[in-house]
Amino acid sequence: MKMLTELDVSDHKEVVEVGDVKIGGEDLAIMAGPCAVESREQLLTAADHVAKEGGQILRGGAFKPRTSPYSFQGLGEEGLEYLAEARERTGLKIVTELLYSDDIELVNSYTDILQIGSRNMQNYGLLKKLGEVDTPVMLKRGYAATIKEWLMAAEYVISHGNDNVILCERGIRTFETATRNTLDLNGIALIKDKLNIPVIIDPSHGTGQRNLVSPMAKAGISAGADGIMVEMHPNPEEALCDGQQSLTLDDFSQLVDELNRVAQAVDKRLAV
Amino acid sequence: MKMLTELDVSDHKEVVEVGDVKIGGEDLAIMAGPCAVESREQLLTAADHVAKEGGQILRGGAFKPRTSPYSFQGLGEEGLEYLAEARERTGLKIVTELLYSDDIELVNSYTDILQIGSRNMQNYGLLKKLGEVDTPVMLKRGYAATIKEWLMAAEYVISHGNDNVILCERGIRTFETATRNTLDLNGIALIKDKLNIPVIIDPSHGTGQRNLVSPMAKAGISAGADGIMVEMHPNPEEALCDGQQSLTLDDFSQLVDELNRVAQAVDKRLAV
Amino acid sequence: MKMLTELDVSDHKEVVEVGDVKIGGEDLAIMAGPCAVESREQLLTAADHVAKEGGQILRGGAFKPRTSPYSFQGLGEEGLEYLAEARERTGLKIVTELLYSDDIELVNSYTDILQIGSRNMQNYGLLKKLGEVDTPVMLKRGYAATIKEWLMAAEYVISHGNDNVILCERGIRTFETATRNTLDLNGIALIKDKLNIPVIIDPSHGTGQRNLVSPMAKAGISAGADGIMVEMHPNPEEALCDGQQSLTLDDFSQLVDELNRVAQAVDKRLAV
Amino acid sequence: MKMLTELDVSDHKEVVEVGDVKIGGEDLAIMAGPCAVESREQLLTAADHVAKEGGQILRGGAFKPRTSPYSFQGLGEEGLEYLAEARERTGLKIVTELLYSDDIELVNSYTDILQIGSRNMQNYGLLKKLGEVDTPVMLKRGYAATIKEWLMAAEYVISHGNDNVILCERGIRTFETATRNTLDLNGIALIKDKLNIPVIIDPSHGTGQRNLVSPMAKAGISAGADGIMVEMHPNPEEALCDGQQSLTLDDFSQLVDELNRVAQAVDKRLAV
């Protein structure tokens, strides 16, 4: 078997299909929504706006991995139900995080893309179970994982039977503290040069600051990314999670316009 | 509730008891054995030597977290049975890694200490389940976790009901490539200054080189650690895992002698 | 006095003029040439090509900072003379590294921009002397300097009398080894959001790989950079320094075309 | 010529003599004093205490490298004069930082050891000039330099004619922010295993916290260091520089006692 990490030939897909939405190739995917699903109203407002601006995928966390055991842990299945309602209403696809391997059936029954977060990138028990479904998996890079380790984690999923893998760069941990993380766009350029597996950029977690989301989204696309995942909240000041890095609805509208221009300049098309 | 991470008062234990072996306080714990349990003979030879030299705890992995899905993944339950046999024969306690949350009952039925590895330090599903048993937990620091995140992970276990938590420093990831990891002894000194929760040092993973294990074990004890965990193999050249950092039996004998002298110089006693 | 590092108001210039070439604002600066000046022929060939493709500034090192004392240290003043000849012939401006404070008069008598390398970013003796000339200074970020320290180093130059300061991001040192450095485009976006001092991106040192130079040059411009500095060699295989990251002449031609499209998409103009 | 960095044979000295004080071998060197020389009284009080407790070398900065151009930059030559007076009075040797290559004659005419700070480790102009004197040089590790680069910097000094080189580990820059730097004791153990060039540990800069100086000094000696350099101030609360990491006089007395015990346990002798 050829491994991804030999970096020359491999069995990964260059385009992963999520229903009629293609991730990879010439298409640019836009995933947006709140960090955490907080209420029905908050989510539907966000979903309507993503759909209106031409995004294809709605994000929102129902199970939240929090550094402190005393922080808000998410709405759980109630959150999943709101996501499904938003899909029904808007036609958007859904991406949400699978946190615990025990929840794989539950989460898989609601979502279109299973998101694996940074802290779980080397949770091998979880990765092996992902091989047993055929739902697309978006595998975020561990915040201190090398590119090789990241590809090896993808290999765990693929070698256990599921080749619908999308990578997501969300920033690595360095000595710099002026930004939340350091987005490693070099890594995107390297992977696209060697492999062409789909890669999404998350400039919200990657910078931690609302003002930096738009320039870094554009930079990510220029480096070769196949789409963006951004946090957007109807009222960032009241967000229960990551408000300082969430775009407002207006910020998001402007980002889509700007991204459209950059996408054309690098031969990608944004389906608006 | 007072949290560990307030770094002034907390509900952690200063001494964790593993049967009649005390971890913390004036006692110095010695944990040694092979990286992976490879065979009955290999394990019993190692166990006999640990016991002979005065160690109290036998280490050995039955389930191995490997970066590549194609590397040796451990003997599984067969490995646990050899560990139990070695305990019966030598009187040593056992520490072994719990890798998958589904295996908690199985592993817990064999081991005296549940080891959580670096890659699982923020696997919150696993941490919560550890709160439901009262077996001592040895929580290795994530290779890119801050000290605060490490203590927060301990807080997950304690706040869910199990206050028998032992920390283990095993090196962090830095720009330096001449050693496998960079042991952060500053972190040990800081934690012992503020909290006095038991901390073990693992100079095998922390350095990746056999020759550096002994000086760094002594350094760790001088910085305040309550014990060491080292890899030792009857025949390191043939080890299936981490041979280059495994001590030989003779190396281990010499290490215990040297450690005894340093322990006395910092008012610790090594139970030989 | 307001300091750069207060990150709200400061005395820096938003556009630095190098003769009739403007660095900053709507203009995009292209600096290219070999890592080291190796011979008259090599340099003039490179210079002709940079001019032909519409670049404005020729780079080339006459004094090379090398990790090993036994590596090629540069042609010294002979190299400066070739640079001056190339300027005469092509009309390009020159940027070259000032390595030793004793050489400031010599190098300043030849060059249009004084480049300060990564290793000298906190060489305060050198920074103070730069305050005594009014030649533009391009200050590369130390490979492990925080953004704040980088701005403080710029403040050394400005507060000693020279406000013609241009910053250059050339990658920072992280745990990732698959690329030579990690380009911190977050830092560019942050500085442009807060200050708008001119910032150049160096994707050659920032990635260490020829294939990644073009995507990362485009990414840097999208993140807000005011120009690029790239290594280009008539025959990279025979380069005495950094051949693996040097573009060929053809690569450079293609890069300029691609950059032109991205520049327009972010409202910059490339003077071709 | 064999290079240090071949890590097997080299021309370095295993013991560097500073007058009758030996650095390296079985002897343990104690260097202590204030971060910056602030006044005659402050320095003489510190010097008397270092001598009384059996230290051999007095530290104190006359020229201070400061991140901000607006911070206290040192007393300059006045500071050097106070150091010379303290030497006369106590018999201690002196170590002080050489910051600018222009000052080498001046500083060399006063000091017994020329200290090169972390920010200047790759200031090759300065390193080359150090080859032209035979005064011992203490070369601090760059805060983001690899061990190999550090040895290469030593090689610059040695290959230019001065083999009296002492290394000093003062902590590296990592993602951890709970301590000022991360002391890399692995590096000390590695260098002593391969080369046995003298290495000093600086736990003051290495931790940034007074309470951690003593455990990390002991840890450094256990890892193989040949001595310590610590900051000590008669009144840390009023220090112009690094007060939070300076020991009081009483702290220092206690440190010497504790160090004595650990030194014996690793076959070093502290000349009290």
Image: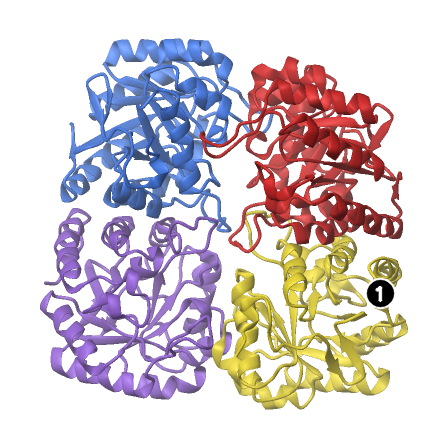
Chain colours: A red, B blue, C yellow, D purple
Describe the element under mark 1 as helix, strand or loop.
Answer: helix
Q: Disc 1: which chain?
A: C
Q: Eyeballing the image, is B87 above or below A261?
A: above
Q: Examine the rendering and report whether any part of residue D234 can be seen.
A: yes
Q: Which residue is mark 1?
A: C249
- Residue placed most toward the observer, D256 or A19: A19
Q: Position of residue A178 (x, y in %)?
A: 55, 56
Identified at 39% across, 52% down, the residue is D182
Q: Eyeballing the image, is B37 above or below B204?
A: above
Crowding at dot 1, Cα within 10 Å, few <14 / some 14-19 / many 20+, comes out as many
Q: Eyeballing the image, is D120 above or below D191?
A: below
* Type of amino acid under label 1: Leu
Residue A75 found in image quarter: top right
Query: Left of B48 or right of it: where is C81?
Result: right
Q: Quadrant of the C terminus of chain A?
A: top right
- Residue placed most toward the observer, B203 or D67: D67
